[in-house]
């Protein structure tokens, strides 16, 4: 998630200052061992899901330390060190955790790589044709059963209030709208709130957030409520289906959480990939950058969505439908909207 909404901005800035001040408390040598110790400590003190992942997947960060410490040797090459550190970070199973060096990017993408894609560019081209409209980052058209269809591929793609007015005005006579964010890996939280507010008709509790207050794994502030306010622009009051798959992550996962809290919205498709921690970055002694989840977010039921959000209707893309040129997930949503 590249930016934060206004109600998160001040606490996050304060947290950023506190994180920066912590870095100077202990110096680590620019050696393989020093860089290993620095990285392990950054995660130990600042990563926000250690307790949660110990409970959910049995992660023991102290045990991880001993497991990887024996692989570190001050005579090892940079490539060997990078491999060890990346392997250690992969134990977190977090797509927001990356180790960045000039020669490579250590990452964990198992949140979508180990699952069916449940989206097909071939089928999307068939449904959208060539005459769809484009409003900045939104592609949209009206399907032949009078269902509006909006495709949004990344929350990094710019969207303005005027764009949203035009799209909703174009679909004003439609029975319902399909918003397809399959494959959307996240981006800008401002866009999340802007778009979701067009489907919100009263102030709605959408989730909670906490902030780190110390270096202990369970040192957090109390949960702060997060609300979505209705847009002052044109709003949609009729049914909506939001299409998701495992590649829906970070800000797109957040959007799914917002939309699922609204009474007119049903989520259709596959479980999302997750990514419920606001990421921050630190630098190791050798200049490598580590990004990690620092601010945990929760849904309206105070449950973590770090490992994703279940759809209201779990629908998979079927090979038999693909052979007929049909997208199982889109077709299910169309039928749901015309009931």
Image (cartoon, rainbow, N blue to C red):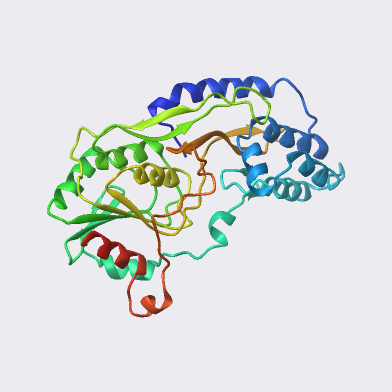
Which x, y percent locates residue 314? 42, 61
- For the point 42% across and 47% down, the residue is 252
Which residue does the image show at 24% across and 52% down from the upper left?
239
Q: Quadrant of residue 216?
A: top right
Q: Please tell me which residue is depicted at 16% across the width and 53% down the height of the picture.
A: 171
Quadrant into which the C terminus falls? bottom left
The image position of residue 4, as x and y in percent, is: 43, 32
Does residue 281 sit above or below 22 in this rendering?
A: below
Q: Does residue 101 appear in this view?
A: no
Q: Nearer the viewer, residue 257 or 123?
A: 257
Decide if residue 260 is on the left or right side of residue 198.
Answer: right
Kindly indicate the quadrant of the structure image that contains residue 144.
bottom left
Above/below status of 205 relative to 64: above
Q: Position of residue 298 (x, y in %)?
A: 48, 37
Number of on-image labels: 0
Q: Can the viewer see residue 256 in this picture?
A: yes
Relative to 22, residue 68 above or below: below
What percent of the width, then of the height, locates residue 278? 52, 36
């Amino acid at each position: 998630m590249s930016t934060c909404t206004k109600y998160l901005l001040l606490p996050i800035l304060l947290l950023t200052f506190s994180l920066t001040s912590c870095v100077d408390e202990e110096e680590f040598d620019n050696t393989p061992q020093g860089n290993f110790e620095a990285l392990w400590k950054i995660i130990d003190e600042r990563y926000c899901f250690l307790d949660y992942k110990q409970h959910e997947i049995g992660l023991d960060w102290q045990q991880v330390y001993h497991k990887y410490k024996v692989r570190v040797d001050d005579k090892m090459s940079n490539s060997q060190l990078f491999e060890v550190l990346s392997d250690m970070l992969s134990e977190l199973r977090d797509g927001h955790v990356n180790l960045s060096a000039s020669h490579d990017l250590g990452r964990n993408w198992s949140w979508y790589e180990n699952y069916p894609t449940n989206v097909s560019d071939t089928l999307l081209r068939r449904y959208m044709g060539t005459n769809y409209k484009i409003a900045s980052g939104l592609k949209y058209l009206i399907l032949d059963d009078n269902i509006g269809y909006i495709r949004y591929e990344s929350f990094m793609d710019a969207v303005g209030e005027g764009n949203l007015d035009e799209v909703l005005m174009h679909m004003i006579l439609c029975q319902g709208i399909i918003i397809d964010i399959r494959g959307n890996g996240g981006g800008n939280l401002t866009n999340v709130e802007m778009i979701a507010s067009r489907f919100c008709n009263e102030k709605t509790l959408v989730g909670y957030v906490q902030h780190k207050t110390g270096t202990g794994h369970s040192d957090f502030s109390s949960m702060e409520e997060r609300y979505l306010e209705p847009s002052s622009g044109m709003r949609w009051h009729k049914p909506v289906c939001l299409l998701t798959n495992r590649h829906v992550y970070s800000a797109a996962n957040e959007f799914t959480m917002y939309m699922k809290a609204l009474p007119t919205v049903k989520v259709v498709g596959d479980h999302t990939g997750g990514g419920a921690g606001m990421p921050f970055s630190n630098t190791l002694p050798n200049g490598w950058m580590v990004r990690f989840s620092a601010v945990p977010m929760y849904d309206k039921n105070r449950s973590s969505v770090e490992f994703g959000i279940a759809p209201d209707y779990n629908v998979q893309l079927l090979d038999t439908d693909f052979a007929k040129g049909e997208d199982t997930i889109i077709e299910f949503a169309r039928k749901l909207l015309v009931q």
